[in-house]
Image (cartoon, rainbow, N blue to C red):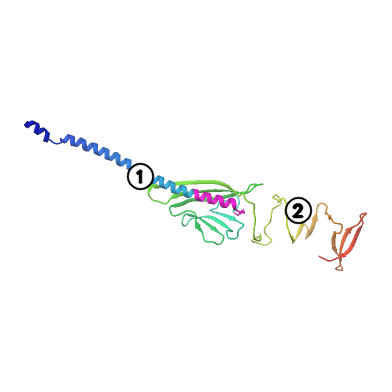
Amino acid sequence: MKNLLKDNNSGFTLIELLIYAAIFSVSAVFLVNILTSITQTQIKQTSANEVGQQVSFVSNTIQRLVREGSVIENDSGVASSTIKIRTTASSTDPTLIYWDQTNNTIQLRQGSSSPIQLTNEKVVVSAFSATKYENPGGNAVVQVDFALAVNTTVERAKVTKFWRGAITRISAATFDSDLLPNTSNALNLGGAGSTWKDGFFNGAVNIIGKLGVSTQPSDISGMASGIKVNGDVSFMASANGVILKAPNGTCYRVTVINGGTLATATATCP
C-alpha cells in the first residue's frame, strides 16, 4: 500500500520533461515557419494583385485612347516617354500620355485640363517607352513598353510586372478645326515617293506658286509660276472655256463651236 501511494504521487522524470520540451519546441518552430510562409505568401500575392490591377488599367487606357485617336504625332521609329494623340474634340486635343519621372507615375493630360495620374502611390514606374511605326497602306502602330513595381522597401513584398503591346490606330483622321502648319511655306503634304491617292474639296483651292498636273516635280522646277499639264484639259460644257486677258486689260473667253472653230467673247476678268 505504501509503494502504491508513492507511485501515484510521483511526477514526470527529467528525461520525460526534456522529451516533451523537445517535441513542443519542434512543433512550435514548425508552426511558426508555416505561419511565416503563409504570411509572406499573402503579402506577395497582395503586392502582385495591386501591380496587376494597375498594369491592366494603364494598358487598357492607352489602347483605348490610341485606337480612338485621329493622329499619333510621335516621330516614326523614335522611342519616347510620351505618346501624343490628336483627337477630334477640342476638349481632349491634344491627348498626352507620359512618364512623370519626378514622381514615378504615368500621367494623362487631355486638352487644357490638368494632368491626372493613371498610377497611384502604391506603385512606381520603373520604365515607360512608346515607339510609333508607320504601316504603308494602313494605320500607324504604336509599340508601348512599361514596367510597374510595388512601392515598398520590404524585400519579400517586392513585385515588378512588365507589359508590352502593339496598338493600331483604327479611326480615320478627322478634324473639327483648321489644319495649319506650325511654319508657313516650310512643310509638305505628301512627297514625290509618298503620294496621296485622291483629294476632295468643297470650296476654293488657292495655290501660290506652281501647279503640275500629271507631272513630276522636276518638270516644273524651272517654272517661275503657272500651270503645266501633261495631258488633256477637258471642259464638258460648251459654254465654258479658257479666259485670257489681253494686254489692254480686257478678258476674253475662248470656246469652240461646231466644226472645231474657236470663238471668243468678252468675259469678266477673274
User: Which residue in the structure is indicated by mark 1?
Assistant: 39
Circle 1: element type: helix
Residue 218's tag is 2
Question: In the rendered structure, which segment of residues is drawn in magenta?
Answer: 56-73
Q: Residue at x 90, y 62 (%)?
A: 264
| In front: label 1 or label 2 | 1
- The amino acid sitting under disc 1 is Thr
Mark 1 or mark 2, which has the lower sequence index? 1
Please provide percent x and percent y for residue 62. 54, 51
Across and down, in percent, residue 190 comes to 69, 53
Report x, y in % for residue 98.
52, 55
- How many residues crowd mark 2 within 10 Å: few (<14), some (14–19), many (20+)? few
Residue 7 vs 186, above or below: the answer is above
Q: In the picture, residue 256 is in which quadrant?
A: bottom right
* Residue 223 tag number: none
Residue at disc 2, secondary structure: helix
Q: Identify the residue shown where x is 32% and y is 40%.
A: 34
